[in-house]
Image (cartoon, grey):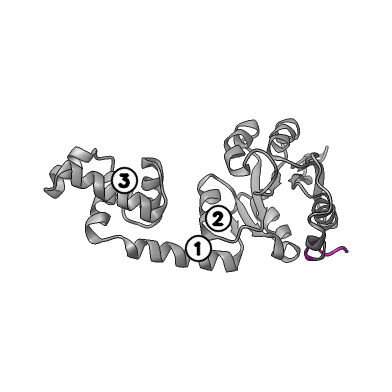
Amino acid sequence: MTSVQGVRQGKDATRAGNLVAVASKPHPDGSEGTTTIVLADDHTVMRNALRLLLDAEPGFEVVAEAGDADAAVRYVRGHKPAVLILDLNMPGRSSLDALPDIQEASPETEIVVLTMQNEPAFARRALQAGVRGYVLKEAADAELVQAVRSAAAGDTYLQPALGARLASADSREADELSERERDVLRLIALGHTNAEVAEQLYISIRTVESHRAHIQQKLRLSSRAELVRYALDRGLVEI
């Protein structure tokens, strides 16, 4: 079998605009069928190697291939695959920006990101956007199949080494918040306005706004919804 790691050396060889899809199809007798997959990566050599890897797995069927995010959206809409394998760095539109359109095109399709981006911030953003799996291309041989199976079953898969880095980064970020910033974040997550936070903490609205700006800068979050999710995920508030 061709090694995915080996073909990474030829990553600059050829680019294409086709898309590969894999979706779940029941057998005529009603038993559980194949996991259909759409494969989106702009490098033909990489797609060929990934397809060899996936086609060798019982129960997997690659139904389409795409070379950019817009093609991925079209094929997902047309094939309704069980899983979309999505490269983050493709020509044209950002794959992360295309996620809402992909999810709208086929809400039941689970997404596994396969990328060279090993920074925790990319994994965090992808997972927050609803991605089920995040695997680095350097580990595709060993981990992509498991990630696809997990995603098809509705489970989240994060490459272990990257998961450890993400947890470490989250811990450092949380430690960077002052006690007052934690208080502000907790109240914001509970739905209080800036004025209500100021009243409860006996500080000015301007001070609340300053704390909020610092929190968003430290955590690299841009909206109230992201702040709420962060606070819930880290146990700062309870539903």
Q: Secondary structure at mark 3?
A: helix
Quarter location, residue 67:
top right
Cα distance between the residues tagged 1 and 3: 22 Å
Counting every numbered tag in the picture gives: 3
Q: Say which amino acid is labelled 2.
A: Ala
- Residue 3 colored magenta? yes
Of the numbered discs in the image, which one, if any, rests on residue 189? 3
- Of residues 20 and 88, the one drawn nearer to the viewer in this rendering: 88
Q: Which residue is mark 2?
A: 123
Q: Is residue 239 above or below residue 104?
A: below
Which residue is farthest left? 202
Q: Secondary structure at mark 2?
A: helix
Contact? badges 2 and 1 (CB < 8 Å): yes
Cα distance between the residues tagged 2 and 1: 8 Å
* Residue at 29% from the left image edge and 50% from the top image edge: 185
Horizontal side of residue 73 vs 4, given as left or right: left
Of the numbered discs in the image, which one, if any, rests on residue 166? 1
Which stretch appears magenta? 1-5
Q: Is residue 107 above or below residue 48?
A: above
Horizontal side of residue 106 vs 225, given as left or right: right
* Residue at 52% from the left image edge and 60% from the top image edge: 120
* Residue at 61% from the left image edge and 33% from the top image edge: 101
Quarter location, residue 162:
bottom right
- Of residues 138 and 77, the one drawn nearer to the viewer in this rendering: 138
User: Of helix, strand and loop, which mostly describes the magenta segment?
Assistant: loop
Indicate the position of residue 168 as horizontal and vertical percent values. 46, 67
Pick whichever of labels 3 and 2 is earlier in the sequence.
Answer: 2
Pick whichever of labels 1 and 3 is earlier in the sequence.
Answer: 1
Horizontal side of residue 163 vs 186, given as left or right: right
Quadrant (top left/top right/bottom left/bottom right) for the N terminus:
bottom right
Crowding at dot 1, Cα within 10 Å, few <14 / some 14-19 / many 20+, comes out as many
